[in-house]
Image (cartoon, rainbow, N blue to C red):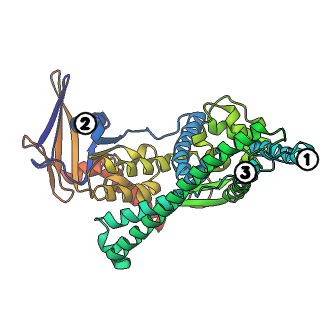
């Protein structure tokens, strides 16, 4: 297949032995004025921007220190957000449950209960036949919470009905046993559900009778209070605080290698209100909330008061600080130049979902050692599953990467007409050919573009030999 695009007086023609570009590494060479970057753009247009990952020349180089620093922070912020949601997922579930607990309201209920109990005991002279009835201050039956049993039944049902992992499930639990388990759990659920319904019916009668007795008696009544629920709430809040403090223990919770770099996710406590404000990316003040940071339950209540954009669904990210760091091979935080190297590796790896990867002169931004040790290796890996086209004037990329195919762009001017003729062929072939039958010597092309010509190449080789001797 031949790809051709017209743009004004320029004619670009990219071909691959009559075949559509397939997985492999293609190196595009040419003079500085040959419009190789434009050729890349034409390939990008042909395949479609959504299907192409195009890494442009100088795209990753830091031009302004402040802008580069912000770009890096934004990158880390995005990565941190994705990871923190995963890391804090269980904690956020606990947050949702704790937010339903109102310890102040529980405390008021207990105080009202104690006061009414004291008043009932003190005003014995007001007791009459109505207040002396057993049901006058009778407590209601506690209903059994069946939520856990319902989840267990649902999980068992999924095991019974699962088809994809049936062999694995059957290897450990026979299907007849699962059927028996499901039936027994359902039987138990129905029995407890019936018991709850009976208790609800009895409780309704008790409440009705109590109300009538209390209306007829002049004696004070004891306020109804669910002491078990209040004690459970207090215990849950205490457990939540233990959980949060354990989650705040400083540690590296995630490591991932990317070339010679290492991405680490570090968790720990926030140290000041400014850190919380940075997480929210708003102008809201966090001083009052941070004053209670060491008391997680109270801290949640203060976060509630702040309001939008501090949403309850994201409270967990204010409880524990999660931050990403990019470390170099020495284990130190990546410097400005190293950040650009990291971004290149990340962009190349991020192209795995594209149909074609285009890289324009990576040597413009990076040194030869990094190109040889890091970039070439990852490019070769990517080229096993998609076409990769690299524009280069550098021998470290052009030759040592050992491409599968070479494209050479040559500008020819006839009168006022400019034509870009593309020569192509295997790196091992003696000549590169164009679609209209012209030929060029492969060795001369490589030496001319990658080594600045034969004379320069031989002079440089002689210099190295002299130093060696």
Q: CA distance from mark 1 to mark 3?
A: 17 Å
Could you tell which of marks 1 and 3 lies nearer the N-terminus?
Answer: 1
- Residue 135: assigned label: 3
Left or right? Give the position of 152 relative to 303. Answer: left
Within-10-Å neighbours for mark 1: few <14, some 14–19, many 20+ = few
Tell me: residue 261, above or below residue 272.
below
The count of marks equals 3
- Front disc: 2 or 3: 3
Tell me: residue 242, above or below residue 132.
below
- Front-lying residue, 54 or 291: 291
- Front-lying residue, 435 or 210: 210
Within-10-Å neighbours for mark 3: few <14, some 14–19, many 20+ = some
Residue sitting at x 46%, y 55%? 370
Residue at the front extreme, as displayed: 129
Q: CA distance from mark 2 to mark 3?
A: 79 Å
Q: Position of residue 344 (x, y in %)?
A: 44, 48
Q: Position of residue 37 (x, y in %)?
A: 31, 36
Residue at the left extreme, as displayed: 437
Q: Position of residue 89 (x, y in %)?
A: 55, 52
Q: Position of residue 337 (x, y in %)?
A: 54, 46
Question: Mark 2: which secondary structure?
Answer: loop
Tell me: residue 286, above or below residue 292.
above
Q: Which residue in the protein does label 1 denote?
A: 124
Q: Which residue in the protein does label 2 denote?
A: 48
Q: Is residue 225 visible?
A: yes
Q: Quadrant of residue 277?
A: top right
Question: Mark 3: which secondary structure?
Answer: helix
Within-10-Å neighbours for mark 2: few <14, some 14–19, many 20+ = few
């Amino acid at each position: 297949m031949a790809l051709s695009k017209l743009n004004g007086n320029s004619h670009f023609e990219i071909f691959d032995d009559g075949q559509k570009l397939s997985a492999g590494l293609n190196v595009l060479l040419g003079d500085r004025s040959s419009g190789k970057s434009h050729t890349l753009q034409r390939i990008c247009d042909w395949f479609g921007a959504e299907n192409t990952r195009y890494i442009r020349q100088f795209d990753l180089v830091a031009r302004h220190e402040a802008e580069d620093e912000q770009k890096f922070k934004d990158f880390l912020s995005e990565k941190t957000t994705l990871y923190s949601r995963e890391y804090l997922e269980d904690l956020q579930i606990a947050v949702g449950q704790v937010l339903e607990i109102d310890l102040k309201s529980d405390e008021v209920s207990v105080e009202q209960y104690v006061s009414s109990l004291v008043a009932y005991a003190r005003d014995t002279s007001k007791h009459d036949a109505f207040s002396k009835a057993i049901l006058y201050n009778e407590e209601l039956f506690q209903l059994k919470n069946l939520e856990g049993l319902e989840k267990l039944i649902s999980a068992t049902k999924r095991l019974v009905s699962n088809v994809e992992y049936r062999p694995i499930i059957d290897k450990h639990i026979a299907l007849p046993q699962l059927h028996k388990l499901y039936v027994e759990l359902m039987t138990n659920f129905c029995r407890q559900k019936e018991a709850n319904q009976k208790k609800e019916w009895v409780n309704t009668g008790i409440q009705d009778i109590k109300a009538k007795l209390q209306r007829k008696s002049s004696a004070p009544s004891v306020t109804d209070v669910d002491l078990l629920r209040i004690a459970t709430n207090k215990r849950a809040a205490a457990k939540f605080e233990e959980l949060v403090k354990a989650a705040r223990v400083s540690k590296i919770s995630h490591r991932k290698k990317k070339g010679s770099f290492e991405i680490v996710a570090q968790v720990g406590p926030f140290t000041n209100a400014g850190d919380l404000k940075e997480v929210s990316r708003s102008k809201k003040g966090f001083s009052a909330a941070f004053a209670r940071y060491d008391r997680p339950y109270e801290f949640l209540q203060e976060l509630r008061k702040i309001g939008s954009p501090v949403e309850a669904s994201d409270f967990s990210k204010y409880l524990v600080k999660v931050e990403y760091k990019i470390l170099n091979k020495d284990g130190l935080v990546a410097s400005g130049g190293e950040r650009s190297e990291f971004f290149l590796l990340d962009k190349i790896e991020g192209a795995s979902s594209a149909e074609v990867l285009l890289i324009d002169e990576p040597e413009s931004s990076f040194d030869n050692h990094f190109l040889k040790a890091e970039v070439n290796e990852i490019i070769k890996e990517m080229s096993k599953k998609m076409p990769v086209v690299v524009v280069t004037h550098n021998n470290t990329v052009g030759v040592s990467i050992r491409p599968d195919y070479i494209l050479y762009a040559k500008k020819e001017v006839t009168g006022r007409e400019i034509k870009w003729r593309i020569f192509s062929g295997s790196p091992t072939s003696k000549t590169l050919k164009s679609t209209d039958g012209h030929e060029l010597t492969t060795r001369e092309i490589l030496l001319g573009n990658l080594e600045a010509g034969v004379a320069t190449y031989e002079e440089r080789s002689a210099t190295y030999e002299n130093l060696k001797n």
